Image (cartoon, rainbow, N blue to C red):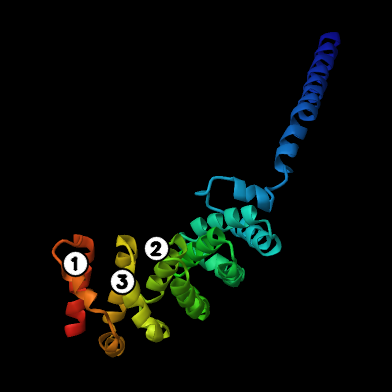
């Protein structure tokens, strides 16, 4: 009997000892895990300091849009636009930004007198415009973008960013008519711009030339005799091939 009683006390001691060890382990290790779980999320400004290629979720995009709308700090605005623009390269985020009401917030920045901010806003809109549903929202800014393209310094980064956006907006026939009154201006840019500007204008004009409804406007536009220089054998092949395709489209 005495041996059984002693064995029982030993077993009870082991159980109590194990329980005490577990309590000590929980007290020392458990709170650390809890602190990790309760770590605060990144602030909106933190998001602009992260890698520009980081993919943000809907909550983070909402914070970023709020920051963009609420701050006048040009450095923060520019960083936010770059981050948004990079995230707008992903189809899922193109829809999320639209649903969060982000397109007007981004588009408002094309009115900025700061040329760098303006360029970044146009770049972000350019990525957003790949989404057809987003184009419905962006179309209201096409006229403003056209006017800015012709008002901005020739061959400037802002001018090229505007031309890229207009090119995306004219991939389909839906909004090409919005550029009808700007064809002569585009042809002038084609003749006076540098190589990069010429290529971008040709991409835009090629989109228009594939729409029969736009052909008349293209053919009736007044152009300088220097237009023939586009078909000079000394011009770069990138420009020459597009110019020949444009000519072929118009003659079909």
Is 59 above or below relative to 204?
above
Q: Tell which circle, 1 or 2, labels the residue nearer the N-terminal end.
A: 2
Q: Is residue 252 visible?
A: no
Asked which secondary structure carries label 2, the reply is loop
* Of residues 171 and 187, the one drawn nearer to the viewer in this rendering: 187
Q: Tags 3 and 1 in contact by the CB under 8 Å rule?
A: no
Q: Which residue is mark 2?
A: 155
Where is mark 3, residue-wise? 190
Q: Are marks 1 and 2 in contact (CB under 8 Å)?
A: no
Residue at 73 percent across and 45 percent down: it is 40
Residue at 33 percent of width and 75 percent of height: 188
Image coords of residue 235 (percent x, y): 19, 62
Above or below, 153 relative to 13: below
Horizontal side of residue 196 vs 61, given as left or right: left
Residue furthest out toward the left: 233
Q: Nearer the viewer, residue 113 or 170?
A: 113
Alpha-carbon distance for marks 3 and 1? 14 Å
Where residue 136 appears, as percent x and y from the top left, is 49, 79
How far apart are the alpha carbons under marks 3 and 2?
A: 11 Å
Residue nearest the observer in this picture, 157 or 105: 157
Residue 56 image position (x, y, % from top left): 56, 54
Considering only order in the chain, which callout, 2 or 3, is on the residue closer to the N terminus? 2
Location of the N terminus (image quadrant): top right
User: How many labels sit on residues?
Assistant: 3
Where residue 194 sits in the image (x, y, percent)? Answer: 32, 62
Which residue is most to the front?
225
- Which residue is label 1 attached to? 241
Looking at the image, residue 161 sits to the left or right of residue 83; the answer is left
Looking at the image, residue 19 sits to the left or right of residue 119; the answer is: right
Secondary structure of residue under mark 1: helix
**N-term mark: 3 or 1:** 3
């Amino acid at each position: 009997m005495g041996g059984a009683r002693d064995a029982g006390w030993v077993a009870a001691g082991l159980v109590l000892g194990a329980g005490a060890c577990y309590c000590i382990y929980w007290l020392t290790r458990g709170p650390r895990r809890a602190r990790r779980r309760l770590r605060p999320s990144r602030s909106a400004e933190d998001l602009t300091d992260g890698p520009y290629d980081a993919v943000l979720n809907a909550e983070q995009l909402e914070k970023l849009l709020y920051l963009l709308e609420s701050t006048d700090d040009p450095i923060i605005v520019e960083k936010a636009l770059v981050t948004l623009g990079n995230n707008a390269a992903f189809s899922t985020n193109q829809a999320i930004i639209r649903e969060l009401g982000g397109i007007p917030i981004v588009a408002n920045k094309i009115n900025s007198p700061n040329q760098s901010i303006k360029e970044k806003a146009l770049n972000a809109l350019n990525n957003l415009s790949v989404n057809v549903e987003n184009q419905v929202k962006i179309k209201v800014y096409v006229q403003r973008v056209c006017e800015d393209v012709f008002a901005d310094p020739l061959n400037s980064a802002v001018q090229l960013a505007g031309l890229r956006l207009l090119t995306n907006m004219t991939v389909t026939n839906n909004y090409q008519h919005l550029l009808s009154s700007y064809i002569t201006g585009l042809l002038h840019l084609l003749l006076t711009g540098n190589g990069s500007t010429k290529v971008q204008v040709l991409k835009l004009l090629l989109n228009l030339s594939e729409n029969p409804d736009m052909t008349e406007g293209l053919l009736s536009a007044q152009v300088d005799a220097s237009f023939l220089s586009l078909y000079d054998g000394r011009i770069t092949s990138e420009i020459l091939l597009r110019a020949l395709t444009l000519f072929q489209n118009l003659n079909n």
